[in-house]
Image (cartoon, rainbow, N blue to C red):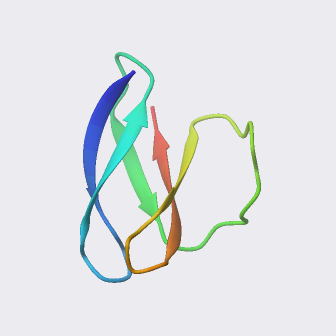
Amino acid sequence: MVSAAVSCPYCGAENTASLPDQTDVKEVTQSYRTGLRGKQNLVELTCSCGSHFGVTYE
């Protein structure tokens, strides 16, 4: 796993996403359906401001 810094789409705070090796952040998604565990190429994050968002990768 590699760590990638991403900004919260709601407040702009920097967060760390753990992604599989040899992948890059594709998009930080403000709107997505929560609870999609196992969805391919999506990591769900929670910001310190309490917002939930998704990070897609390729």
Q: Residue at x 52, y 66 (%)?
A: 53
Residue 10 lies, with reference to residue 44, above or below; the image says below
- At which x and y percent is residue 50? 48, 78
The answer to which image quadrant residue 21 occupies is top left
The answer to which image quadrant residue 35 occupies is bottom right
Q: Which residue is drawn at 24% across and 72% down?
A: 13
- At which x and y percent is residue 10? 38, 82
Considering depth in this image, is 51 or 24 the residue closer to the camera?
Answer: 51
The answer to which image quadrant residue 42 occupies is top right
Q: Which residue lies furthest to the top in this view?
A: 21
Q: Which residue lies furthest to the front in this view?
A: 48
- At which x and y percent is residue 9? 36, 74
Marks counted in the figure total 0
Residue 38 lies, with reference to residue 54, above or below; the image says above
Considering depth in this image, is 41 or 18 the residue closer to the camera?
Answer: 18
Left or right of 37 on screen, residue 53: left
Left or right of 39 on screen, residue 23: left
Q: Which quadrant does the C terminus fall into? A: top left
Q: Residue at x 49, y 77 (%)?
A: 51
Q: Which quadrant does the N terminus fall into? A: top left
Considering depth in this image, is 40 or 17 the residue closer to the camera?
Answer: 17
Left or right of 4 on screen, residue 41: right
Q: Which residue is drawn at 42% across and 31% down?
A: 19
